[in-house]
Image (tube, rainbow, N blue to C red):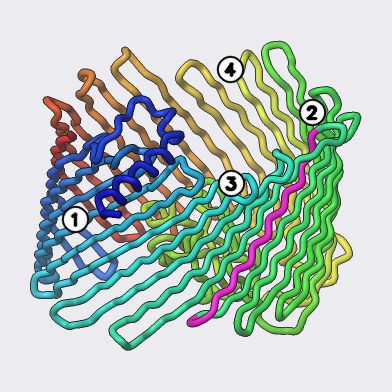
Amino acid sequence: MSARLRTSIGLLIVLIFCEGLFAQAYRYSLSWWKIISLRGFLQMEGFYRTRESYFRTNRFEEQQSKKLLGEFSIRAKNYIIHPNFLLLDLEGGYQPISQEDKFLVFPDRTETRTAKRYSINMTLLRRAPIRLTGSYRFQHDFINRELLTNVETIRRSKIAGVFIQNPLLPLQLKYYEDKWDQKEIDTGRTFLNYKTTYFAEASRSFKGEDAHVIRYTHEIYDRDYTGFLTISSRIDNLKLNSRIPFKLARPSLYTSSIWYYRQRGFTELDRLLAFQDLNLELKYNFTFNTNYQYSHIKQPNYHSDLNMINASLQHRLYLSLISKAYIRYFAADHIDYRDRVPTAGVSFNYQKKIPTGKLQLEYEYRMRRDERSGEPGLLRIVDEEIVLRDDRTTLLKNPLVDPASVVVTDASGTILYQEGLDYILIPRGEFLEIQRIPGGQIPNGATVLVDYISRLPVSYRYDTQSRFFGAKISLFYNLLELHYSTLKQDHSNIRIETPRILEYIDQMSYGGQINFAFISAGYEYEDYQSNILPYIEKRFFVNLMGTFFSKIDLAVTGNFRDYLLTREQERQTMKDISGKMTYWLGVRTALNFDGGLRIHRGKGLDLDLYSARAEFRTRYRQLTYILGVEFYKRRFIGERADYNGIYLRIRRDF
């Protein structure tokens, strides 16, 4: 049989096999090569910026920066024979950058960068029982810093996947390979980063409504820093998730999640996490929920086992009253100590429609016992989650912390924040307060992870009782909202060397808000009496948001917070206003303004922060023009930073 005949027969078999795949795609025609879409853009951008910095050491620094950037990007979607046979996604780009920095104190610097990239993504038989995918990505960057160094970076990524669809056991198999080579041409120093990943996922449903998924990942990391330091890690991840719905009096649900993590090589770590949850919908509007959590962590010279059990019974009376009783038990066994924390409580939530509004009442009573036993020594805390907000006082959860041991990172643990730039630490008796610094890297409301060492006594026991009551009423169809709440917390059966570290709380707060058209304004008052950090706080706020004259989109927010630490007679005031406005000159032309002002006064946090930006944007004959000016001023404890800039961007999409 000739080669031409074998080829013809092979193509015929492929077309017959794919006929069912193409049956639902009438708008596509058979073709050896056809472009579905071709898109891209050409962009040029330039900016000029100045920055002046004044430091407490009486040092002054001035910097002027000029930058010119160009970028070309194109993306084409294609298919061979038919999209359901072979689909190709091709993408490429080129980006040259030139930047010049002039300093008053340091040597001037000129920097040139070029970056080019391309990628090929392929999907073969995308509607067949067996689907194949693959991609290749290449990126080449070159940075030339005058009189300093030349850095060349080459990054290559390969991905291959197989998707097997079948009623018995759908399966996914993937392979990832990522190579990142970086070299300083003048010095010969190199940084090599290789990562290989094997991924497998299988899913199965036995009765149509349940779902079970198992995932396994094996990762290989190899890093080399110019031969001086070699890091090699092998990581195994195994996850099993199950979801089983069933019906008693009403639909109920059981969920399970198990995760095992194992790392070997430069760093050794074993972690096992398990979560089991059962939710039963019973007769007479009763709901029973119970769950169990387990965590095991093992590292060299450190290990911990955590167990937590929760159970609750809830009843709904009509649509108004929800009653709930619950118990919890937490047990932790660390290398240095052991914790046992049982908790029990009841809560009620009552909601009732009233003329022109709604009434809501809440009540909760909770009892808890904390008991810890262990050998004398220092307590090491790892990855304590803390939420940093400008309108809240945040203390580290354990007392007697060594401030020099505090390490703060982002929620992923990859960004290390700096004290004095991103956050500050303020002693509050036996506790340590942490505050973010506006203008730093930590966003308002962000969750951070904190590591530290505490001298907390390793053996103690005490009981805690807390009572909470809250009321909220809205009238005249949400025109007026009022709220009131109280919280009382005290302790008994105390066996601890330092009882003053236990927090007694007597808190009362109230406030109101008026909502009218596009304006809302309100007032809040809080009296927080405590043996740890008593304070009185007053807050005023106003929000304005709306569209005016069909041409102006406006959003403005203002806050004033007066915060008094009653024991220290220390006052902090925080004023901030921020706004954003868009003025539409036409369908394709707009003026954008946004800015903010923030003034803080208080211990360790004397801060003035100003920022503003104005931008003109228009589109004419497929070209988009953006012209903007911006400035930023920061005053923090005797240090100043003034920043001004102007930029122009021109873009052509096709």
The picture quadrant where one finds residue 247 is top right
Could you tell which of marks 1 and 3 lies nearer the N-terminus? 1
Q: Amino acid at mark 2?
A: Tyr
Q: Which residue is mark 4?
A: 479
Q: Amino acid at mark 4?
A: Leu
- The answer to whether 283 is drawn above or below residue 422 in the figure is above
Q: Which residue is mark 1?
A: 51
| Closer-to-camera residue (57/491) | 491
Q: Residue at x 58, y 50 (%)?
A: 170
Magenta-tinted stretch: 251-266
Q: Position of residue 58 (x, y in %)?
A: 23, 68
Q: Nearer the viewer, mark 3 or mark 2?
A: 3
Q: Which residue is mark 2?
A: 350
- Left or right, 369 with respect to 121, comes to right
Q: Nearer the viewer, mark 4 or mark 2?
A: 2
Q: Residue at x 35, y 48 (%)?
A: 10
Crowd around label 1: few <14 · some 14–19 · many ≥20 (10 Å): some
Label 1: element kind:
strand
Mark 4–mark 3 distance (CA, rounded to whole Å) = 57 Å
User: Decide: marks 4, 3 in contact (CB < 8 A)?
Assistant: no
Residue that protrudes farthest toward the bottom in the picture = 228
Disc ID at residue 390: none
Disc ID at residue 166: 3
